[in-house]
Image (spheres, rainbow, N blue to C red):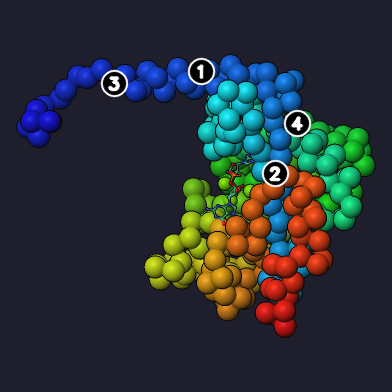
Amino acid sequence: RAKAQLGDTICYYEPSMDENARARRKLANDLRQAIERDELTLLYQPQCFISDGRLSGYEALLRWRHPTSGTISPVEFIPIAEETGQILAIGEWVLREACREASNWPNSHRVAVNLSPIQLVQPELPALVTRILLETGLSPRRLELEITESAIITDKDRALHNLRQIKALGVAIAMDDFGTGYSSLDTLHSFPFDKIKIDKSFLLQSDQNEQARAIIRAVLALGQSLSIPVLAEGVETASHFDLLVNEGCQEAQGYYLGRPGEAPSVLVAHEPGSLKLAALRAANG
Ligand code: C2E
Ligand code: MG
Ligand code: MG
Ligand code: MG
């Protein structure tokens, strides 16, 4: 430590870096068999309209049930899958599984599927989406794709071309994690998004941080002037929900309204009689 304080350049061996690399290699290896071994599953998290508490749809969220390491979060394995290219097979599996499951739901709610930036710049993406919709019989109106802006940064022409073709099928396109990363007004201006999702970090800080509340207000104003509905992520408390009601946000998603769950139980929990949604409906008159 003394040396570091003197500003010496210390050449050190860091075993944890090695272990990290090894762990990533093992995950990448195991991931190769995850699809065949049926280890991937989708959870569904409800999204609702703030005006009346009605469900607007469900977001499909990927989980990996690893045989020895337990459930692994997409935050851990999606970046690895993106590095190795496995994201294409995984992304196709997710899209097919979400459409297949949604086509069997007893209600006709929408399913929102996250797309990796790598998927979004594949020339074959529009054909793949078309094929999966035909295969599963899901109406295009019931599918929404959530994208982040990094893909549009990577290859803007290809990304916008794909988005236009997919939107022409009747599929909705949402801009995810708005306000973080590379979000730019230029992207909003280049493509008619059907929804803007404000990143959860803003609502999660909103109780203590006036700046965060100001940004939420600004995004809502932007959505209003562009006529794009805004969904706020990360609604964890009644106070978060109240803020959205007061500021005129259109849709909400978060643990306060419902956690991601297995399709059958989540669907039953949010049927019209559900306590939480009924309470919200009542509270909003
Ligand atoms: P995302 O698309 O922004 O999804 C929202 C994340 O916020 C989910 O995390 C969800 O479980 C979490 N969340 C929902 N409500 C709350 C809340 O009230 N509080 C807090 N703190 N968190 C909440 P999850 O499931 O771990 O997914 C993380 C990210 O992984 C997603 O962020 C998305 O970028 C990515 N991801 C998930 N599934 C897929 C997939 O099928 N394909 C791709 N390419 N990415 C996926
Ligand atoms: Mg998302
Ligand atoms: Mg998000
Ligand atoms: Mg995200």
Q: Secondary structure at mark 3?
A: loop
Residue at x 58% of width, y 30% of height: 70
Chain-order first, disc 3 or disc 2? 3
- Say which amino acid is labelled 2: Leu
The one nearer the camera, 187 or 100, is: 100
Residue behind mark 1? 25
Nearer to us: label 3 or label 2 = 2
Coordinates of residue 175 in the picture (x, y in percent): 64, 53
**Looking at the image, do the residues carrying marks 2 and 4 touch, with CB atoms under 8 Å apart?**
no
Residue at x 9% of width, y 34% of height: 5
In-image side of 16 versus 180 (left or right)? left
- Say which amino acid is labelled 4: Trp
User: Could you classify mark 3 by the number of other residues whose Cα lies within 10 Å: few (under 14), some (14-19), or many (20 or more)?
Assistant: few
Residue behind mark 3? 14
Q: Is mark 2 within 8 Å of ligand 1?
A: yes
Q: Is residue 184 visible?
A: no
Q: Quadrant of the C terminus?
A: bottom right
Quadrant housing residue 193: bottom right
Q: Secondary structure at mark 2?
A: strand
